[in-house]
Amino acid sequence: MFSEYLLSDGVSKEQIFSLNFEEREASQYNSWEDVYDHISSSLPKTGMRYVFLDEIQLLPHFEKLVDALFVKQDIDLYITGSNAFLLSSELGTLLSGRYIAINVHPFSFAEYVSAFDGKVSEDRLFRRYLNTSCFPEAVKLDMSSPDMVNSYLHSLYDTVVVKDIVGRNHLRKFDTLQRVVDFLFDSVGSVISPNNIADELARLTKTRISHNTVQKYLRFFAESFLIYPVQLYNIKGKRILASNYKYYVVDLGLRNILQSNSPDADLGHKLENVVYFELLRRGGMVYAGRTENNEVVFVVIKARGVREYYQVAYTVNDEKTLNRELSSLRKVRDAYPKYLLTTDFDNTNIDGIQKLNVVDWLLSEY
């Protein structure tokens, strides 16, 4: 898309070089030096040149190629990859402070709605959004061949777990890894620690697993962008709590293919998952808040220390539930914005706390 934009903006085709290392044509290169020489010979010698290298982590010693191209003042370089191996390697050290990383997420709800072109109501689409995948290809299949969606998601999951995690990290105990994934997917939005997971798996399977092994697996999942860990934040003390985390899954469709829950099960945590990724898209550092013995589901810290507080509940139709959700926000004593997001249809202000319909919020400008 960016190449097409450059062409429409007057950049000549000769100034643009693209190579996808997953394609058969890339297998002809035996070393990073071969790729460098081919790029140099393919581009003009003067003027700005634009280089796009896709799935570059498949090239041995790719970081040396990136560094050799990056030092050229007249080369604008873009590299893509499907996991964090790009920046967990030597590349992060070589380019420290000299690159901008853009993490690409599955469709936001607004993007998901736009894919259906107004043919289905937003409220119906939101229920589908909670219970199906928001990967672009899965959405496309859902509209044309819905029976193929689960097959696609299973193959995607196998690629991430088997290729990205098991293969790259030379793991042997796949069954143990799968149990940890199942536990995490079943615990979306809950505060857990490696010790919690190890103890619970030992109880359920009668098989001992060390918390160090669990911690290692959690790091692998995060590096492959399968799960996103969220640190706890003490609101009163204004400090990060290092011991426990909440975890959210990159796509609820992946969770749903491994869980036997009905579409109406665990809606509160599914909603939290959706809100978390929307907050990531909107910018700032996202934490799980703690205040005395209560929780504020999310605390977002933005530029210059500006904060936003979010409580998330599927519905607060009865007064007891409403007061419980509001009480945590009421205990936050600063004047920064506070929101209660639900699927209820009323948008009201309660003691300075803005209660919003989550569908309206997801589709709003920011």
Image (cartoon, helix red, strand yellow):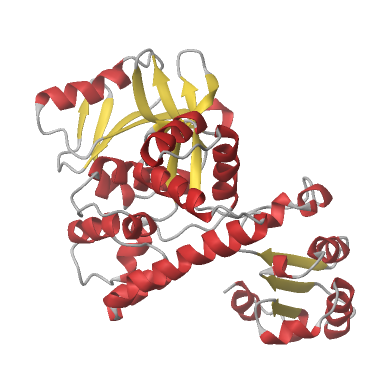
Q: What residue is rendered at 45% in x and 18% in y?
A: 235
Residue nearer the viewer, 316 or 200: 200
The image shows residue 233, relative to residue 178, as above or below, that is: above
Q: What residue is rendered at 22% in x and 28% in y?
A: 349
The image shows residue 285, relative to residue 98, as above or below, that is: above
Q: Quadrant of the rendered structure where residue 331 is?
A: top left
The answer, for residue 3, to whether it is visible in the render is yes
Residue nearer the viewer, 216 or 112: 216
Residue at the farthest left position? 318
The image shows residue 71, relative to residue 233, as above or below, that is: below
Tell me if 257 is positioned left or right of 301 in this view. Answer: left
Q: Position of residue 258 (x, y in %)?
A: 35, 57
Q: Position of residue 184 (x, y in %)?
A: 42, 43
Q: Position of residue 295 (x, y in %)?
A: 35, 23
Residue nearer the viewer, 50 or 165: 165
Q: Quadrant of the rendered structure where residue 271 is?
A: top left
Residue nearer the viewer, 248 or 178: 178
